[in-house]
Image (cartoon, rainbow, N blue to C red):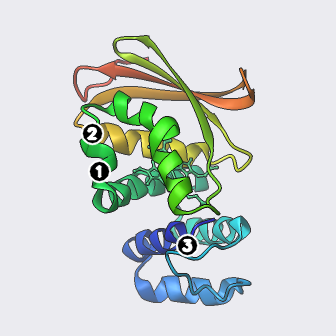
Amino acid sequence: MKGMVFTQLIEMADTMLGPDQVEAIIAKADLPSGGAYTAVGNYPHSEAVTLVGAFSEASGVPVPALLEGFGEHMLRFFHSNYPAFFSTCPDAFTFLESVETYVHVEVKKLYPDAELPRFSTYRMGPGRLRFDYYSSRHLENLAAGLIKGTLKLYNEYAVVTHDSIEGEHGPCVRFLIDKTTSSIQPSA
Ligand code: HEM
């Protein structure tokens, strides 16, 4: 997993828990890399799992919610560091559709060792996007946060749901993104 994921995870944890506690957690986790990450390095996925578990325990935030929050954090980081990917897309759906066909393609050119998920998207109507996520790493909560972060960035409102299903290319997590006109969500 790319070092930028680790440096950003630690940055978010610093805000949640304070740098001293984060340092103590990293020292206690006894990580193979020693817990010193550089943005351009590549580190085992298992270290990210260990850190997320430890930050969850220390903060009391359950792992799925922590991963979703991290997705929103990462989206803001991507927007600050790769603005060109966003400036060419007028709305959230166009940007989300471009991740598979353009953004991750460019990411792979920049970082050939990146391990990226696959997506298959389909517009079911003007306000409804189907977004299928394929990855052996099962980071659907991270994906949910990245999707919700994208909607916030574009000042758009939507109800986002997801389910594990058998997709066109095997098992996947299917997101349905339903645009609403305001932040007031329809009641169930
Ligand atoms: C400018 C925007 C984006 C950039 C630059 C970007 C780049 C990256 C990078 C560098 C990684 C790490 C790969 C590795 O650790 O080896 C990654 C992973 C990932 N990206 Fe993106 N990404 C962007 C937007 C998105 C969006 C909008 C989604 C929406 C779902 C997304 C979903 C994911 C997921 C879920 C992973 C984790 C790997 C996995 O699930 O298998 N990304 N991306």
Mark 1 Cα shell of 10 Å, populated few (<14), some (14-19), many (≥20): few
**Depicted 73 relative to depicted 174: above or below:** below
Name the residue that disc number 1 marks.
Answer: 84
> Amino acid under label 2?
Thr
Question: Which residue is found at the position 44% from the left and 17% from the top?
Answer: 188
Identify which residue, 58 or 8, lies in the foreground.
Answer: 8
Which secondary structure lies at badge 3?
A: helix
Name the residue that disc number 3 marks.
Answer: 3
> Amino acid under label 3?
Gly
Which secondary structure lies at badge 2?
A: loop
> Amino acid under label 1?
Ala
Is 29 on the left or on the right of 107, as rendered? Answer: right
Identify which residue, 80 or 28, lies in the foreground.
Answer: 80
Question: Which residue is found at the position 62% from the left and 72% from the top?
Answer: 51
Tell me if label 3 and label 2 are in contact, CB under 8 Å.
no
Tell me if label 1 and label 2 are in contact, CB under 8 Å.
yes
Is 166 on the left or on the right of 96, as rendered? Answer: right
Q: Look at the image and tell me in which quarter the N terminus lies.
A: bottom right
Q: How many marks?
A: 3
Name the residue that disc number 2 marks.
Answer: 88
**Depicted 148 relative to depicted 12: above or below:** above
Q: CA distance from mark 1 to mark 2?
A: 7 Å
Identify which residue, 159 or 62, lies in the foreground.
Answer: 159
Whole-percent x and y of residue 126?
34, 12
